[in-house]
Image (tube, grey):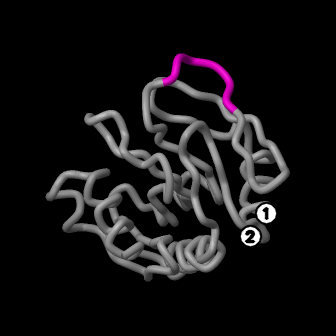
Amino acid sequence: MRKYGVILCVGALLSADAAAARDSLGVYNGWGAFRDSSPHRCYAIASPDKGGAGNGRWKPFASIADWPDAGIRGQVHIRLSGGHNTGGLVLKIDDASFPLVAGGADAWAPNAAVDAAIVGAMRGGQTMTIGVNTYTLRGAASAIDAAALGCAKGR
């Protein structure tokens, strides 16, 4: 069932034209890994297990992306269930808390060091929560690794 949630999550992210250019790198317990050629990026992505209804205009998701052309690895991006005014949010992974910067429907880590700390916590964590959304982290490390390898292998 979670596999279909990942597919629906990715489908909701992009138009039909953009989805045609996507390469699937695998699905790992509800986390999917994908590679896009234009722009060149690879990412792990999941929809929340709880609180995933969205607001009708979009569906929430969590993603960890590599953008090789920009030299960016492990960038955290969260699409929130509902809009959030510009400002700070807190992402929780088990007992650890991480600051996020929000703008509208999206939230990111404030810098690469926090991105790395979040990804590290995800690798050993059980659940990730932001607002009303809860994500199971089983399979996240495998999807993150598959995405990183997908970009390392080129286009």
Q: Quadrant of the C terminus?
A: bottom left
Image point (78%, 56%), residue name: 94
Mark 1 residue crowding within 10 angstroms, few (<14) / some (14–19) / many (20+):
few
Secondary structure under tag 2 reads: helix
Q: Nearer the viewer, residue 118 or 84?
A: 84
Image spot of residue 20 (x, y percent): 19, 67
Image point (57%, 58%), residue name: 135
Q: Quadrant of the N terminus?
A: bottom left
Image spot of residue 18 (x, y percent): 22, 57
What is the span of residues highlighted in magenta in the rendered image? 84-89
Image spot of residue 84 (x, y percent): 51, 23
Secondary structure under tag 1 reads: helix
Image point (58%, 52%), residue name: 134
Residue occupied by mark 2: 123
> Disc 1 vs disc 2: Cβ atoms closer than 8 Å?
yes
Q: Which mark is residue 120?
A: 1
Q: Gap in Å between the C-alphas at discs 1 and 2?
A: 5 Å
Mark 2 residue crowding within 10 angstroms, few (<14) / some (14–19) / many (20+):
some
